[in-house]
Image: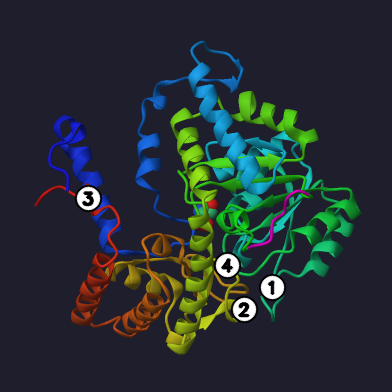
Amino acid sequence: MVDRTPLREADPEVFSIIQQETERQEYGLEMIPSENFVSEAILEACGSVLTNKYAEGLPGKRYYGGCEVVDKVEELAIDRAKKIFGAEYVNVQVHSGATANQAVFESFLTPGDTIMGLKLDHGGHLTHGLKVNFSGKHFNVVAYGVDKESHRIDYDEVLSLAKQHKPKLIISGASAYSRKIDFKKFQDIADEVGARHMADIAHYAGLVATGDYPSPLPFTDYVTTTTHKTLRGPRSGMIMAKPEYAKDVNRSVFPGLQGGPHMHTIAGKAVAFGEVLRPRFKEYSKKVIANAQAFSEALIKEGLSVITGGTDSHVLLVDVRPADITGKLASELLDQIGITANMNTIPYDPEPPRVCSGVRFGTPALTTRGMGVAEMGTIASFVRQTLEARDDENKLESLKSDVKELSKKFPLYSHRLVKE
Ligand code: DSN
């Protein structure tokens, strides 16, 4: 429990907002699959004096003086990332996953070129070709989907579209796809049609690091990721690629898209990668998947339907129509009792995206705070009861206190809360 802090003294308003968010994270159940909780060590690195330093350029080749110390932390982050993923080339300067993808595009595509990516409403990502995103605005997008029955990626369709449209880039990876992606197959298709392949592993990176999810390295042209999802680092991005693309990707990041890298965040990434390299992270990764599978089975027992019938990863997509409710209302009710998930389209969704029929859940954050298979069963029951209690405010209130009680058994950042 904290009492006096420099921030509390200097700016009580901001301090209070951060306290409110700390409480929300402490006393709620965080089930957004792209979120996680970083360690105190990472928070310390990200809040360090490294935020003060400009370091445009690369280690040893900077445009500013005084970079000899921050060079060391960037080199450390790069070396650790190479070791984790078996990568030959890494850029740790990109500020986010979206910028990582944009940097790859900018490194060899020109506006009007054809690219292929998974449809957003089938589990893809904004930067994989959505019309209102830079990827959809500047490029000719040919989107592939999942099979209507199995809801799995239809590799035959990918190949046939690739042969027909001759894209320059094929993107694999997803933000709401729970099953294993065959990255090798994507690379083979790209090679067959003379395209390059970019695997966006933002969601799966932590599981790829431990070998619990297929790795696209070393055979994939470009691999991009965020560092804050299953990888459990600070909010940021990273690019890996075949060494022959290194120069163009580096130039695309700086000076192409960014100025000074955020050295405090790079320090946080180095710390996170150090954590990933320790044996405990392997246990964590296995638990994340075991929890997602247990949660999926428990939800099915509670009468809900899970797209593809389960998951191979940290994420699951639930079709809430058996509970006679929309994804929008379901996620709002869950939010009301302290379970944070997000509404999500399901493949071939009959509802429009702002209403949709699905809710996307994930287990990385709850696993970090120590929850296991038993808690997944309890939470699945909370979910079913919440959807049933949609018109019963008293029941919803009681579920909210059940959520708080469960959360309290798994302390997270409680030492950061002010004394009452
Ligand atoms: N917005 C992220 C997610 O929630 O999956 C992807 O970048």
Query: Which of pointers 4 and 3 lies earlier in the amino acid sequence?
Result: 4
Question: How far is mark 1 from mark 2, CA to CA?
Answer: 7 Å
Q: Is residue 136 visible?
A: no
Q: Position of residue 124 (x, y in %)?
A: 62, 59
Residue type at numbered disc 4? Ser
Magenta: main secondary structure: loop
Q: Which mark is residue 415?
A: 3
Furthest residue toward left:
420
**Which segment is the magenta one?**
213-218
Of badges 4 and 2, the one in the foreground is 4
- Verify whether residue 169 appears in magenta: no
Which quadrant of the view contains residue 180?
A: bottom right
Of badges 1 and 4, the one in the foreground is 4
Q: Which residue is mark 2?
A: 308
Q: Which mark is residue 313?
A: 4
Secondary structure category for the residue under label 3: helix
Is residue 10 shown above or below 3? above
- Classify 10 Å Cα crowding around label 3: few (below 14), some (14-19), many (20 and above): few
Residue beneath the point at 12% across and 42% down: 3
Disc 3 residue: CB within 8 Å of ligand 1:
no
Query: Which of pointers 1 and 2 lies earlier in the amino acid sequence?
Result: 1
Q: Which residue is mark 1?
A: 152
Query: CB under 8 Å between callouts 2 and 3?
Result: no
Residue type at numbered disc 2? Thr
Task: Give the number of callouts.
Answer: 4
Q: Position of residue 175 (x, y in %)?
A: 57, 59
Query: Which of pointers 2 and 3 lies earlier in the amino acid sequence?
Result: 2
Is residue 211 shown above or below 67? below
Residue type at numbered disc 1? Arg
Q: Position of residue 237 (x, y in %)?
A: 55, 42
Question: How far is mark 4 from mark 3, CA to CA?
Answer: 31 Å
Query: CB under 8 Å between callouts 1 and 2?
Result: yes
